Amino acid sequence: MQVIGDRVNIYDDSGKLVADNVPVEGLDPINNQAIKKILYEIKRTVIINLEKVEKSLRTGELGGEFCKMPHYAIPDIAIIDNAERIRERVEAFIKSSKDDDSRVELLNGGRYLLIQLPKGMIDVSADYTVSALVGGSATVQAIVDVCKIDPLKAQACSTAIFGRYPSTIDFKGGAIISALGVPLRLEHLGYGWRTIQSNIIVSLANRNAMKAAALAGCFEMGYLVNAGNLIGRYRRLYLLGFAYECLNAENLVYDTVRATGKDGTTGRVICEILDRALMKGVIKAKERLPSGFVVYEPVDLELWNAYAASGMLAATMVNCGAARCAHGVSSVIVNYNEMLLNETALPDVEFGRAVGTGLLLDFLTHALYGGGEVGIMNANHPNLKTSKLFVMPCVAAATALDAGTLTYPPEKTAGVFSQVFKHIKEFNNPIKSVADAAMEWEGMK
């Protein structure tokens, strides 16, 4: 069995120590119960927009704009008024036993129906679409039963919920809201955990930048396990990167932001990271050239990458936080890595992948698309798929720090997710929860 022996001290988003001497092996999703909990809750959850279903059926506009079929309209259907009866019916459909962990609740005064499938259904499913398919089917049947829909118009209920699927590969025009995108849109095999939008992550984190980065890191770690990237020679690289960048190991992100947040620049962030790395012996001066330029080299390559990634997140928070605008995150990623490489001769984050990702993100959000916003991006998008683990936390943190410049902010596209997991500690405080779970894993060995 491959074992990484590194240990770290983990600090929360307030700079307070929450766990010391944490084994990085315990941060592997396979070993960490907190990360498992986060991934499990996301996988089994789907939300049905009952208000949209009611409007679609009343107007006959099924499957989205321009798909108007008046002959399918049910003008007097009362879904919101019967929301509680529909909820009870759905609950009866999906419950596998009296004491299972299924959950069916109404949100926002009955406008949304939250459905969380029991563990038994998740265990026997080949992929994560079970939540959308079972939840959607149960809601269709519940509406037909409760509202006594004519058999000839029952199909309209299905279209109102599932949209144009299967004519399209997703639920276009439907009422299904899921954190995870449909498998047919995956850029590569194993990319399921990368389909979660930045806006959704920010809503789950209640707009806390460091918690958003931590949750983004948890989803990326789930992907790394799924895609076979958390084994062999890459294992230590990603475990240390997750610990330092996403979980604020050694308080590196927090200290750097605090030191440079008032009047700092990307260059000052780099200086802070270099000073800390030199002090800790992570890097060393290799030689001084006749020009006076100092060439540095890493003493510990994987640990240096973790330091560099922490600096990239700190630079994002300093710049996007000062501007109160998420749009600059791509420029920060590009310029941070270019400056770091050219000013020190040290490897940049993930050895060029991060800067390449930043360049494409900059091009597609500010040039070709002209309006492709970071809030609606996910790590499965061509913009962000190149870098593994290290870029998505920066995008999520930038989105969390935005103060209203986004056309599609988290509150508009994913606000309902802020209510779903608000009582679950792993979402409320992911940094502490993951650190505590790592310590518990060590105690169980």
Image (cartoon, rainbow, N blue to C red):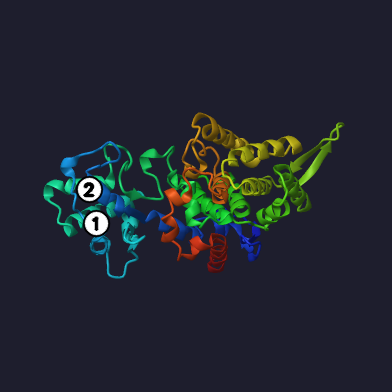
| Residue type marked 2 | Leu
Tell me the crowding category of disc 1: few under 14, some 14 to 19, or many 20 or more residues within 10 angstroms, Cα based. Answer: many
Q: Is residue 53 left or right of residue 150?
A: right
Whether pointer 1 and pointer 2 mark residues with C-beta atoms closer than 8 Å, the reply is yes
Q: Quadrant of the N terminus?
A: bottom right
Asked whether 310 or 289 is in front, the reply is 310
Q: Residue furthest top?
A: 368
Query: In the rendering, at what x and y percent does residue 445 appear?
Result: 54, 66
Residue at coordinates 63% horizontally, 61% vertically from top-left?
Answer: 10
Tell me the crowding category of disc 2: few under 14, some 14 to 19, or many 20 or more residues within 10 angstroms, Cα based. Answer: many
SS under mark 2: helix
Query: In the rendering, at what x and y percent does residue 408 appear?
Result: 46, 44
* Dot label at residue 57: 2
Q: CA distance from mark 1 to mark 2?
A: 10 Å
Q: Is residue 81 left or right of residue 252?
A: left
Q: Residue furthest left?
A: 151
SS under mark 1: loop
Residue at coordinates 39% horizontally, 45% vertically from top-left?
Answer: 181
Task: From the image, tell me which residue sits under label 1.
Answer: 79
Asked whether 96 or 160 is in front, the reply is 160
| Residue type marked 1 | Ile
In this view, 218 is above or below 384: below
